[in-house]
Image (tube, rainbow, N blue to C red):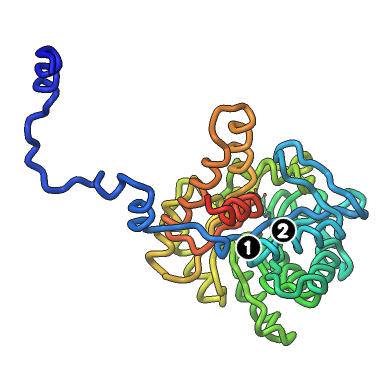
Amino acid sequence: RPIALEAAAESARPAALGITQRPRRNRKSAWSRRLVREHTLTVDDLIWPLFVIEGTGRREPIASMPGVERLSVDEIVRSAEHAARLGIPAISFFPYTEPSLRDATGSESLNRDNLVCRAVRAVKQAVPELGLMTDVALDPYTSHGHDGLLQDGAILNDETVALLVEQSLIQAEAGADIIAPSDMMDGRVGAIRAGLDRAGFRDVQIMAYAAKYASAFYGPFRDAIGTQAALVGDKRTYQMDPGNSSEALREVALDLAEGADSVMVKPGLPYLDIIRRVKDEFGVPTFAYQVSGEYAMIEAAARNGWLDGERAMAESLLAFKRAGADGVLTYYAPRVAERLRAGA
Ligand code: PBG
C-alpha cells in the first residue's frame, strides 16, 4: 500500500475506549431493531372519529383538517365498512348539527332521530362487529357552543348532568357500545352509569374523558362541527388548566369510582406526561385523543413539504403507546391502518 494511505489509516485509528457496552450493536440492522423494540402500534389500538352531516352521498371537506371530511349517514356506513375491513376495532361519531336546530339548551341532543342516533343505527345494522362510541356533551347542539347549560355566563353543572344522562340513554338505545362523556361536568359519570343501569344498559361501557384540558388544539374540531364562530367565551371553568398534572389523577380517580370502564387523556402529544402518570397510578385502560389541532399541525407541515407526514404520523402514534396508552383516538386511523397492513 502507498505510504500515504498507511499513515492516514494509522492516524484515523481511535484510541481504545475501553467500553463493554455498545448500545449501537442492537441497532445495527433492521432485524435486530425489531427484536429489541419495546412498544409497537397495531391496528387494535385505533379508534376513528368521524364527522356526520345531513343529506345523502355527501362528503364535505373541512378546511382546517385537510384529508378529513364531514360525511352523510350513508357515507359514514361506507367508512365504517372500510374501518372493519382494515381491522379497526371502533369508531366514534361527532355531528355537525344544522344551525337551525341549535338552541340554548341543546334540545336536539335529546332527539331520538338526531344525526348521531341515525348514524349509529345505520352502522350497527350494516357492520355489527364494529365498536360504536358516542360523545356525550351539549356543544354540537347549543347555540352558544358550550358543553353545558349557560346561565348568566356560568355553566350549570347539575342541571347539565341531568340532560347528559338523557342524551346517554338515547345513544345507548340507538346502539352505542361506548358512551364517552366529553363535557367535564362533575359527577356525570356516576349519574350516567346509574341511568344506564336503571334502563337495562348494564353492558354499555363508559369511556370518560377524565383529564380533558382547556386546549387551543381543539380549534379545527370546532370548525368541523360548526361551533368555533358561535362559542361565547372559553371552556376554562370546566375543562382542566394546562398547568395542572396531579389534578388529572384526581379527575381519573373520581371517574373510576363513579363507574368508568376506561379513561381518556386529551389532547394527546402535549400531555404524554399525564398519560404516563395515569397509567402508572391506576393501571386501567387508558386512551389518548390525538385531537384535531395535532392532526392539523402534522398535515400543515407535511403539505408544505416541511416534514415527512407519513413518518410523523406513525411516530406520533407510537409515542402514545410508549407513554402507556392502550389506544388512541385519531383522525389518522384508516391511513395508519393501511400503513400497518403494508408492513411499514
Ligand atoms: C366537545 C369536544 C371537543 C372535542 C371532542 N369533544 C372540543 C371541545 O371541547 O371544545 C375535541 C376533539 C378534537 O379537537 O379533535 N365536547
**Residue 246, label in figure:** none
At 72% across and 58% down in the image, what residue appears?
Answer: 148
Q: Nearer the viewer, residue 214 or 87?
A: 87
Whether the residues at callouts 2 and 1 have beta carbons within 8 Å, the answer is: yes
Residue underneath mark 2:
148
Location of residue 178 (image quadrant): bottom right
Location of the N terminus (image quadrant): top left
Question: Is 22 on the left or on the right of 192, as rendered?
Answer: left
Labels 2 and 1: the sequence-earlier one: 2
Q: Nearer the viewer, residue 230 or 22?
A: 22
Q: From where the camera sits, is residue 260 visible? A: yes
Q: Residues within 10 Å of mark 1 (few under 14, many from 20)?
A: many
At 52% across and 51% down in the image, what residue appears?
Answer: 317
Q: In the figure, 68 relative to 89: above or below?
A: above
Q: In the figure, 217 relative to 192: above or below?
A: above
Question: Is 182 on the left or on the right of 105, as rendered?
Answer: left
Location of residue 120 (image quadrant): bottom right
- How far apart are labels 2 and 1 at the CA level? 8 Å
Q: Secondary structure at mark 2?
A: loop
Q: Secondary structure at mark 1?
A: loop
Which amino acid type is shown beneath numbered disc 2? Gly
Q: Residue 214's spot in the image, x, y percent?
A: 58, 48
Residue underneath mark 1:
185
Q: Residue 215's spot in the image, x, y percent?
A: 58, 45
Q: Residue 59's spot in the image, x, y percent?
A: 84, 47
Q: In the figure, 101 relative to 81: above or below?
A: above
Ligand 1 neighbours mark 1 (CB distance < 8 Å): no
Question: Is 270 on the left or on the right of 32, as rendered?
Answer: right
Which amino acid type is shown beneath numbered disc 1? Met
